[in-house]
Amino acid sequence: MNELKKSILVSLWFMFLTFPLMVIRVNTIDQTVVWRWENMALIGIGSFVLSFVWRWAMRRKEAGDAVAASGEKKSSKVAEWANNPALTNTFRAIFLLGFLVTPWLVTTYQTNILISFLLYVVLGLGLNVIVGVAGLLFLGHAAFYAIGAYSYALLNQYFGLGFWVALPIGGVIAALAGIALAFPVLRLRGDYLAIVTLGFGEIVRLVLENWSDLTGGPSGVSNIPRPGLFDIKLSVADANIYIYYIVLALAIITIIAVTRLKDSRIGRALQALREDEIACEAMGIDRVGVKVMAFGLGTAWAGFAGVIFAAKTTFINPASFTFFESAIILSIVVLGGMGSNLGVILGSAFLVLLPEYLRAFSEYRMILFATAMVLMMVFRPQGLIPAKGRSYTVDDPDLNPANGGGN
Amino acid sequence: MKRFSGLVIAACLTLLTSTAFGADTVKIGVAGAHTGDLASYGLPTVNAAKLVAKDVNAKGGIDGKQIELLIQDEECKPEKATNAATKLISDGAVVVLGHICSGATKAALPIYTEAKIVTISPSATNPELTQSGQYPTFFRTIASDDAQAKLGVDFAIGKLAAKKIAVLHDKGDYGKGYAEYAQKFIQDGGQAEVVLFEGVTPGAVDYSAVVQKVRQTGADTVMFGGYHPEASKIVSQLKKKRVKVNFISDDGVKDDTFIKVAGADAEDVYASGPQDVSGLEMNKAAKAAHVAEFGTEAGAFFDAAYAAMQALVNAIDKADSTDSDKIMNALRTENVDTTVGTIKFDARGDAEGVGFSMYQVQGGQYVELK
Amino acid sequence: MACPSVLSTVRQGAVPSRRRRGIMDWQYFTELFLGGLTRGSIYALIAIGYTMVYGIIELINFAHGEVYMLGAFVGLIIAGVLGIMGFPAPAILVIAAVVAIIYCAGYGYTMEKIAYKPLRGAGRLSPLISAIGMSLFLQNYIILAQTSDFLPFPRLIPDFDFLEPIAHVFGSSDFVIVVTSALFMAGLTAFIKYTKMGKAMRATAQNRKMAMLLGVDSDKVISITFILGSSLAALGGVLIASHVGMVNFAIGFLAGIKAFTAAVLGGIGSIPGAMLGGLFLGLSESFATGYISSDYEDVFAFTLLVVFLIFRPSGIMGKAKVEKV
């Protein structure tokens, strides 16, 4: 009965709350008012039902949290699978094969979407190094994406450089910019860092937009050539497939590089930095150097992705690199579970492929997407694949396993 | 004997042309802003396409093939425009009606150029699109921005005796383009002075600082390049701060929505727009058909879009094929009666016989000034 | 009336052909100053919401700008309905503002319960993403529930006679904005300083666990914080809509980012800081546009933010945080 009462209250509340916006439609241009009472009924019933669902889901989540907090080693099925090397390798092989063959099986449009997806994977992995591994809150990633794209576009426009030459240059320029940003913001912690990087991201975009003489301003730069294949002229569809493979290659290289990075000395230094900066310094790790390196690495990848993006769309302008972009890339990292590669891939799939395939719902697409984002965070804040520290089991008979002698 | 062989030849030709058609339908792509804040510029084009297609299909289609419309929304955003273009091509569009905004059109054109798809826009006015020569498959049924800017400048100096002109824009591709041309023409003409050239941020909280700046420069005229939301806000602020200037703008503002949103402040505003062709019979019929079919008045660029569709249909028909070269040739050589008059296209893709006029808001309505 | 001659000539709407140019054109300066004051008041109203929420739960509430936008829309709807029913303009304005405040308080409260409360223990990033999702949700909610068009907002503030001499510089709606904002902000400051709940809020902001131990219901305090912040933002929305004459689903984003910048400039977590930051930003932008160029107006605002954060992260009013090792 209590449950029923609660739900009725919730339902009444929502009906009240959404009354002006959902029921009344005023058109001040034509001076008309439309009263849509049916919406109120919809909200009433919907919120009534959903409140039950919500409470059930919350209870489940709290139970799950309690279990995790008590230290029980109850890992999810997915994590179990992820630990089984034979299984993961087979999966990887299947996926790889799938990705390799796809462009020949689907339309150019679908290939385009997949290229977008892979670009975001690369972006997400790059940001993952900064945010997930090093724990630095970075909200300006789109700026470095833009720097990479504009490097190629402008180098091509003013100096006629081709794609393959511009690719490494774009990455280097983005990395340098990242390092340049890193130095002044070194001292900042947590949220302040986030705000500064947000500001920086906006500054880059606004400068690109206003410095028309150099960057073409809002008109952007067009007619950016696609990557050439030994001077063979490719049709639109074929060029797309070519780009797809380039991006796929980049994505694979990035995955490998990031994985190696995490295991390396630098990677471990970054993770130590994330956990406790002061202790890091006490241990002799060069805080400055490590932070700068994290920035440089993460942004370099954004630069590479940017060059490819410019080549893919053949036209760039500042409107593609807004704060919203940075927010999406960050969401990919967080949704996927910070620090894990597979998580980033899944997060990217969720955030990039989902809106595309939701096109069927056309006008409800964005709101469903936003709802999904909020729900994902509320019910699984640790992300799809939560970051797991490396665990070692110590096989020492002296240590009594019953006393928690393991990791 | 002769007749028989004639029959055979006719049969072969029909076979050949039908294979040249390929599919059972003629797929015409319609790309533009159908959602988002610029949807009011793109949706009338969709309606125009639908009306023409319905009409033509009822009469048996083009050379016996029905028209199929492939509608793609790109919100006037360049990166979405490239996606839309790719989709239209991969879905088999043979010609495209679109895009709507100059920026989006510019982004999509390289794709259409490479795929050799004829594209006609009813509203993309950026001069480069036809004047640069880089887009040979592009046509349009509206005059370009430099013509608009020139008209505005000549009007300001000639009719309004402007001496000090403040040129503003919305930092967007279209608005800034118009403003830059206006500035150039004023400076080249030497009869008036550009006392201010600045961009305002769309969506900013208020524009009082820019308005104060306009007053400070002593300008007697403001020329604004951009769309109606910003124009509306600036005009309101100008009136609020009692800055007495003439306000001249482009066809992004020559829209009834501007008058409705700005209300009383819109009075006396000048804007250039496509010449008034509402007297033409075909035009009246098209507008009436719109009301009959959709229940509302036709919106922005409807005339030009309807005309563009008519031109496309006519060209495909006269060319007896969907081969792009033949269509382009037909567009350039065949006159076609449309809702904007009898037109054909010149070598660069502009429509001959289509120009701009200056309008003023008088008594809550845009009135064409002769 | 002993008005300076320059003001009286401009009152007639004519532009003086020769301006007295001494060391400084004081008239222009005043114009920009007053314009900046208006803009700054709006920023301040929104910034307070950001700073209060951050002070209490250390979350940057990205959806706050959308609350401002919701306020404008609710105000529009009420104003539209009442207008058709024939109410007099000042009454419409007051009623619309009150209703908008009530509703946005409700939205703020609900938003917190759904998207932020469940995430209280979950680190910094998850609530941030949730906030971003919420912001996107509210924007699209308006698009679906209302429209994506630009809707005109009726001009509800009549021209005040006593302002006539300077109306071209500081009109009646500017006046209403500045005065109303000042009143509400003063009210809020008094509330925080003198009431029990205000004390509870300050305590919770300083140290939540300690406050809880002392018997403060932190859930209630947090809800009140959101309610107050949203109310002010809603007021800002209605005022600005009436001033500019137009509402649209996208106005929340830019205003939100600017207000957030203002909150940081003033020292995030400090309410007087947010007010000062808002005014400071509004004035800076106005002067930057007036004396330099409006092209780089936004770049200026963000550069200011970055510079401040690098050299004085605690902002104008904030106290430097002592980092315990």
Image (cartoon, helix red, strand yellow):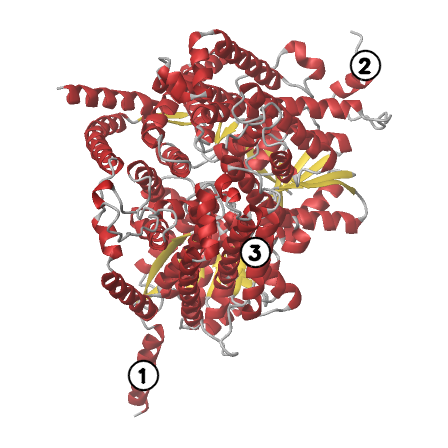
Mark 2 vs mark 3, CA separation in Å: 59 Å
Name the residue: 54% across, 42% down.
A197
Q: Is residue C107 left or right of residue B158?
A: left
Q: Which disc, if any, is residue B12?
A: 1
Res B204 → quadrant: top right
**Circle 2 SS class:** loop
Q: Which residue is mark 2?
A: C4
Q: Which residue is mark 3?
A: A175
Name the residue: 30% across, 84% down.
B7
Badge 1 amino acid: Cys
Callout 3 crowding tier (Cα within 10 Å): few <14, some 14–19, many ≥20 = many
Q: Chain of mark 1?
A: B
- Quadrant in which the N terminus of chain C appears: top right
Badge 2 amino acid: Pro
Q: How many marks?
A: 3
**Circle 1 SS class:** helix
Q: Chain of mark 3?
A: A
Which mark's residue is nearer the viewer, 2 or 3? 3
Badge 3 amino acid: Ala
- Residue B370 in the image: state x and y as whole percent: 65, 43
Callout 1 crowding tier (Cα within 10 Å): few <14, some 14–19, many ≥20 = few
Q: Which disc, if any, is residue B219?
A: none
